[in-house]
Image (cartoon, rainbow, N blue to C red):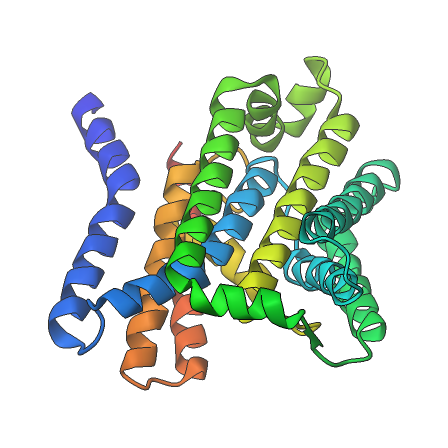
Amino acid sequence: MVRANSLRRIADNYAPVVFLIGLALLLGVSTRGFATGSNVLNLARQHSIIIVLAVGQTMIMISGGIDLSVGSVLALSGVVGGLAAAQGIPIAICAILGLATGCFCGFVNGFVTAKARVPAFIATLGMMGMARGIALVASQGVSIDLPPKISQWTAAHSFAMALLFVILMLTVALSCHLILTRTVLGRQCYAIGGNREAARLSGINIDRHTVVIFTLNGLIAGLAGIMMVAYITVADPTAGEGYELDSIAAAVIGGTSLFGGRGNVGGTVVGAFILAVLRNGCDLRNISEHWQRFVVGIMTIVAVFYDRIRRREQ
């Protein structure tokens, strides 16, 4: 029995990694252009943003919650930063404004969830609509161009931008990993997600934890918004549509439980890379985006079903 449990834990931890390696090898052999430097560069820039969002989503899900607003908060943060940049405000201050916007949206999510006792699903669904609406109104429904010197610099330094994106992604992932594994806040995430009532009886301030963890996730979404503006060189109010589902899918495929109490940052990063490699391979093979979403949906359902089976056995 002990040996069987050990083998199952190994399978749970390494199955996504094995699948990712196998998928990458298969596409590298069968798909022209997949293993090229330019394609790897594009993967690093484009999908680092999804990984950043997915890492933040992981902490929310481990705590037993969910955040459906991250895509819209990304867009609003980018629009705020883009509007400031268009007025000639220094780029560092523009980035701070975008981060502050994300923080505020996350704080509202946490406050409404904790104090108004609104389920996280509903609270963040409302924020998804509000943030997207404000972004569209503020930008008048059109993309906001960055000053020419900024867009020209980013276009001329594509490798440096890709490297910066990877550094930011790794920084966020490592920081969240340390929070979950080395801090009281991280231990509270697992305790609350595993058994909310037991966590409350043990003295954990669940309301304060909820506000803090959603605010932190808002900050991460704000950073993703700034990264998106740097990637596409415009502040697009429609950016990030569907990213909330991608972030959830990456976390679930990587082993984070949709029911709380289980998950880790490393698994989420692997899950996000699985989605990135899969979609990139489909794009190179001219497979429709609709079919890509179908496959991602199937993978998410299978991962949730498997997690459900594991919970019943335990």
Q: What quarter of the picture does the N terminus occupy?
A: top left
Horizontal and vertical percent position of residue 115:
87, 36
- Tell me which corner region of the image, top left, top right, bottom left or bottom right, holds residue 31: bottom left
Residue 84 spot, x, y in % from top left: 78, 60
Q: Quadrant of residue 26?
A: bottom left
Along the line of sight, the residue nearer the viewer: 288 or 145: 145
Q: Which residue of the protein is positioned furthest toward the right in this rendering?
A: 116
Q: Does any portion of residue 240 appear in the rendered image? A: no
Above or below for 142 versus 150 = below
Residue 246 versus residue 123 in the image, above or below: below
At horizontal 64% and vertical 61% (from top left) the residue drawn is 71
Residue positioned most to the front: 149
- Direction from residue 245 to residue 157 in the image, left or right: left
Residue occupying the far top of the picture: 202
Residue at (73% x, 62% y) in the render: 85
Q: In this rendering, would 197 be left or right of 308?
A: right
**As rendered, which of 300 and 278 lies closer to the eye?**
278
Q: Total marks drawn?
A: 0
